[in-house]
Image (cartoon, grey):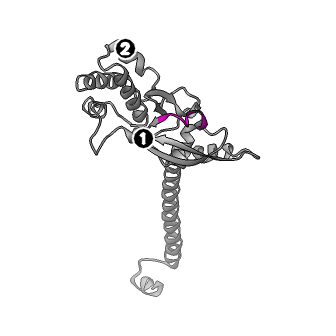
Amino acid sequence: MADDCRAAGGCDTHHHEERPQESNLLSKVAQTKASRRAFIKGVIASGAAMGASGYLFRAGEAQAQARVPGAVERLVSLKVNGQTRRVDVLPHETLANTLRYKLGLTGTKLACDRGECGACTVMANDSTIYSCTTLTHAVADREITTIEGIAKNGQLHPVQKAFIEEIGPQCGFCTPGQVISAVALLKANPKPTVEEARRAMSGNLCRCGSYQQYLAGVMRASKEI
């Protein structure tokens, strides 16, 4: 090709020697861009995975810590959502861990794990308790109701319907605890005032800030019960 160019009087060999180098350079640039894209995608994917798995990791960690050397599980009969469930329980095991990781009732959420946020709220004999700070053995003789036991025969409870109509749930993480607290309130006091409802719901935190919507839902449900 160089001879043909010389014959045409238009180019020299130096020009042709640079083209492979330019090609290699462009190839390296393309590879670098592809590598950067792959790296960024990897960072984003791993970040999302870490965010999603953080909750599961905490759960696994909590279970591992619960297994103290020398602790012996004892078979307990729990009355949960109208059914008797037999389960092996450690002496210091919390009700939240029993419900979630041994009975598969994952509607009960674990968040603060120290009785502050209300995400783990369930009912024991129609009274609300924080299951993350309640030992399973301590409530073995009570009727436990979780969010899975609120709807009946495929029909939502009036509280659940009202929360939907008032657009209460946002991320939804606190919603099970909010529902349980509202149901317990209306069992004890079917026609609460706004202030009574606000006080009864004060033990449930909502990071999305939907307090007014949840409160409106309670008041709406009170008219349907």
**Where residue 41 sits in the image (x, y, percent)?**
48, 55
Q: Residue at x 47, y 36 (%)?
A: 144
Label 2 sits on what residue type? Glu
Q: Residue at x 56, y 28 (%)?
A: 115
Q: Nearer the viewer, mark 1 or mark 2?
A: 1
**Where residue 19 sits in the image (x, y, percent)?**
49, 73
Q: Where residue 24 is drawn, which disc sits there?
A: none
**Where residue 97 sits in the image (x, y, percent)?**
56, 42
- Dot 2: what SS? helix
Give the residue at mark 1: 81
Point out the tag, 1 or 2, that comes first from the N-terminus: 1
Q: Residue at x 48, y 64 (%)?
A: 30
- Dot 1: what SS? loop
* Vertical relation: 171 (above or below) 36: above
- Name the image quarter holding residue 146: top left
Label 1 sits on what residue type? Asn
* Vertical relation: 6 (above or below) 37: below
Mark 1 and mark 2 in contact? Answer it, CB < 8 Å. Answer: no
Give the residue at mark 2: 196
The segment highlighted magenta reads 137-143
